[in-house]
């Protein structure tokens, strides 16, 4: 099947779904108090765009801070723990266990310690984003093929050169995979904090609209933040492709 | 053996540091472990919240229903899209693409539609658990060696026999991993849903205790939730290992 | 039965690819006599595997027909034709024994009887004691022997083999060839054996058919009138080998130079 046909089938299916949804609301198959038709949502997007845009900006700002911390800590610790056998043996199970832990359980604690506002959002976002990045980097480091390293050493490369020219390019795909996953997790964390703590931002906007029974605006805001998220991930994927074309 | 000793040392070290530091600062906010243990005792004795079993029961039921739905619909949709030749190609990118959206953005819409009761938690848990299952079915079907299907046909297998005797055993490992991931995510989804807005359930109690600043009780509840998570995932791991062995 | 077990008449097949269609076989006609060991020899890509797949009922031809025992083929029929491929294709989740039983399971043979038959086959292939092993625990040669036992379990009069020893190292190949001859002598099956090895063709078969490069046609047919056991060093074998090489060399070169 050619990519063109596939694209057509995908768009066709989505259009059909949208059509069905629109019909369902128009014909009152679903209560319009809870569900808004695509046409209403589209209108609402234009309506709320300015305000939503501002709030998305707030959320994004916190996310970027959390992301920077997650990436810094995640890559830094990931490289070290992955490289040092002893550290890996001792610490990896802890990391895996903490990753699997539902972080929502510590959210109240974080709010107690950091109060409301940006700090808890950044901390919680970092908490969410750190683990996948760290674990993926650790995996990448441990997966490194020894042979190119030996070859480089045998050609007289210094330790620094080995790191820069052999190990770093080999770890890069794992690092990029971690970074792609990390941004979604950071954003997720920030949104959860905004929802739970009533902190200014997209999360709070969503819960407010839900409580006010404004489905069109709510779906619109949900759509906007979804588009943003997909756009960010696609951008990162583009970057990934550019940087690892040798694969 | 030495590794275990180191791990124990790290654990003890962290707990100790936590204890000391919390004691130094405000113990109400920082909740040292020494406060959590007695709170946990009171909690389990049903002194703090006599209705704890009901809340816990509700959470477990929500998880089971949500997971049941996720598995049923995930397997159904997965096989529906994965077995015919081209459907998977068309729809899998869409499903994977939805993964890029932080799942929690759907929750307010679910709360609007289903209300604050268990239904919204079940819906959210279902949503979270559904994707790993579908994607695992699609990946599993793809992972089956085509040559094995040729061999089976040459030995006289019709489409039904090919499915039952070649496709299903061939995809078991991938499928089980997906089912296990789905359970973990469903559990998280239900808990998050309860914490963010509910009238009952373990997550609700956590929110409730936190709201009243009964921090030690909150921590005890969180610890209980943690045990629940570990038990459920542990059980899933055992099932996965058992089934792995059985299909060689 | 006086009808020849395999009759191929005017077979043609094109493979449809993204950029058009590629001819695989063109006007192939062939008859295989009962109990005959026939080798199909040809360069890579000449369509020998396609030919075998069509005879086995796995692929439909575009033109022409195949008759097994006088009846046209319509899909795989394990009661008449068993197949062995270059990739043994053992089911990794089944033990060696369970693999051999597979075809019998499909035919509804009882569990006890299946086990008996399968055990009885693993012995002669030299794998007694390996019944409970999984494919990942077996070597390449062992896996292929299990695959052959699995095909033998069907007890079909015809056996089709598509470069079964192609993935094995040379020494194993030689041993497996000898062993296969033993099986053929004992079971008296009609065997169609595909290979690109001149040596294998000379050692194993009674008749050799040479195919051209793509699109595959039958170029020549040779009766191997050598006594068994075959001595590759003998004068007759050397002459035959020379004649075969002369036929096939040009085809091989054409296949070698074909565009990707």
Image (cartoon, coloured by chain):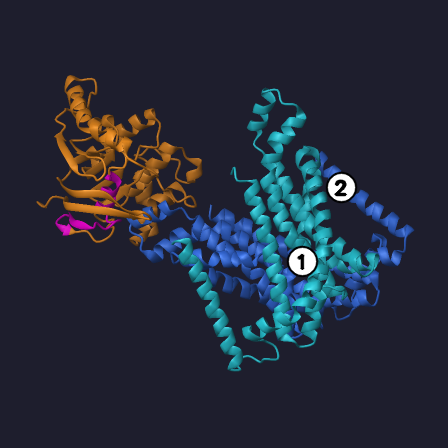
| Point 59% across, 20% down: residue | A154
In the image, is residue C17 above or below residue B45?
above
Look at the image and tell me in which quarter the N terminus of chain A lies.
bottom left
Which chain identifier belongs to the cyan chain? A
The answer to whether C95 appears left or right of C118 in the picture is right
- Colour in which chain C is shown? orange
Mark 1 element type: helix
Based on the picture, tell me whether residue A80 belongs to the magenta stretch: no
Instruction: From the viewer's side, name the closer residue of A43 and C16.
Output: A43
Q: In the orientation shown, which residue stands out farthest toward the left?
A: C2
**Mark 2 on the same chain as mark 1:** no
User: What residue sits right under mark 2 in the picture?
Assistant: B8
- Please tell me the numbered disc located at residue A188: 1
| Picture coordinates of residue A152, whole percent (x, y) | 59, 24
**Local crowd at mark 2 within 10 Å, few (<14), some, or many (≥20)?**
few
Q: Drawn colour of chain B?
A: blue
Residue depicted at 18% across the width and 37% down the height: C188
Magenta region: C47-71
Q: Is C67 within the magenta? A: yes
């Amino acid at each position: 099947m050619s990519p063109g046909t596939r694209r057509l089938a995908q768009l066709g299916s989505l259009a059909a779904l949208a059509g069905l949804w629109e019909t369902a609301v128009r014909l009152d198959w679903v209560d319009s108090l809870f569900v808004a038709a695509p046409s209403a949502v589209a209108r609402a997007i234009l309506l709320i765009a300015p305000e939503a845009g501002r709030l998305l900006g707030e959320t994004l700002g916190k996310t970027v801070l959390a992301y920077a911390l997650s990436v810094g800590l995640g890559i830094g610790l990931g490289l070290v723990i992955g490289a040092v056998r002893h550290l890996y043996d001792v610490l990896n199970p802890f990391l895996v266990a903490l990753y699997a832990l539902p972080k929502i359980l510590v959210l109240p604690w974080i709010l107690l310690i950091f109060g409301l506002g940006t700090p808890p959002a950044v901390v919680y976002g970092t908490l969410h984003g750190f683990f996948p990045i760290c674990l993926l980097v650790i995996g990448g480091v441990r997966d490194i093929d020894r042979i190119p390293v030996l070859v480089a050493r045998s050609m007289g490369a210094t330790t620094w050169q080995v790191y820069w020219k052999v190990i770093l390019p080999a770890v890069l795909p794992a690092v990029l995979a971690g970074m792609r996953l990390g941004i979604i997790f950071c954003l997720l964390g920030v949104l959860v904090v905004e929802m739970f703590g009533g902190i200014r931002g997209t999360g709070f906007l969503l819960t407010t609209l839900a409580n006010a029974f404004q489905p069109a605006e709510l779906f619109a805001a949900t759509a906007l933040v979804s588009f943003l998220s997909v756009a960010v991930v696609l951008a990162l994927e583009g970057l990934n492709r550019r940087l690892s074309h040798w694969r | 053996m030495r590794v275990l000793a180191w791990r124990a040392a790290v654990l003890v070290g962290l707990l100790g540091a936590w204890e000391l530091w919390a004691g130094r600062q405000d113990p109400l906010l920082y909740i040292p472990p020494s406060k959590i243990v007695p709170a946990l005792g009171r909690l389990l004795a049903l002194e703090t919240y006599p209705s704890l079993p009901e809340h816990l029961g509700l959470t477990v039921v929500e998880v089971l229903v949500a997971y049941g739905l996720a598995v049923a619909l995930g397997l159904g949709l997965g096989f529906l899209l994965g077995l015919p030749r081209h459907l998977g190609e068309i729809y899998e990118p869409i499903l994977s693409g939805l993964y890029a959206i932080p799942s929690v953005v759907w929750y307010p819409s679910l709360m609007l539609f289903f209300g604050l009761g268990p239904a919204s938690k079940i819906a959210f848990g279902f949503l979270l658990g559904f994707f790993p299952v579908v994607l695992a079915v699609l990946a599993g079907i793809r992972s089956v060696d085509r040559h094995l299907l040729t061999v089976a046909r040459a030995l006289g297998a019709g489409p039904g026999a090919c499915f039952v005797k070649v496709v299903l055993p061939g995809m078991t490992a991938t499928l089980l991993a997906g089912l296990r991931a789905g359970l973990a995510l469903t559990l998280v989804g239900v808990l998050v849903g309860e914490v963010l807005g509910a009238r009952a359930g373990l997550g609700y109690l956590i929110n409730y205790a936190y709201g009243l600043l009964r921090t030690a009780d909150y921590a005890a509840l969180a610890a209980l939730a943690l045990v629940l998570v570990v038990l459920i995932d542990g059980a899933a791991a055992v099932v996965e290992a058992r089934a792995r062995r059985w299909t060689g | 039965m006086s009808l020849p077990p395999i009759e191929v008449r005017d077979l043609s097949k094109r493979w449809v690819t993204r950029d058009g269609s590629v001819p695989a076989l063109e006007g192939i006609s062939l008859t295989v006599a009962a109990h005959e060991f026939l080798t199909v020899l040809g360069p890579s890509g000449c369509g020998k595997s396609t030919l075998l797949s069509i005879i086995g009922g796995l692929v439909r031809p575009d033109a022409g027909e195949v008759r097994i025992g006088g009846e046209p083929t319509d899909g795989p029929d394990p009661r008449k034709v068993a197949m062995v491929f270059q990739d043994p294709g053992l089911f990794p989740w089944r033990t060696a024994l369970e693999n051999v039983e597979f075809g019998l399971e499909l035919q509804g043979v009882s569990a006890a009887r299946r086990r008996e038959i399968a055990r009885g086959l693993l012995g002669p292939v030299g794998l007694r004691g390996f019944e409970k092993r999984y494919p990942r625990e077996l070597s390449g040669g062992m896996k292929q022997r299990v695959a052959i036992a699995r095909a033998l379990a069907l007890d079909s009069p015809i056996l089709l083999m598509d470069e079964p020893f192609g993935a094995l190292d040379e020494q194993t190949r030689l041993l497996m060839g000898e062993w296969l001859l033993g099986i053929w002598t004992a079971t008296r099956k009609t065997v169609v054996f595909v290979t690109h090895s001149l040596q294998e063709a000379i050692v194993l078969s009674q008749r050799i058919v040479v195919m051209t490069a793509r699109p595959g046609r039958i170029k020549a047919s040779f009766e191997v009138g050598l006594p068994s056991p075959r001595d590759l060093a003998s004068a007759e074998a050397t002459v035959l080998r020379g004649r075969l090489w002369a036929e096939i060399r040009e085809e091989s070169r054409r296949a070698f130079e074909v565009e990707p």
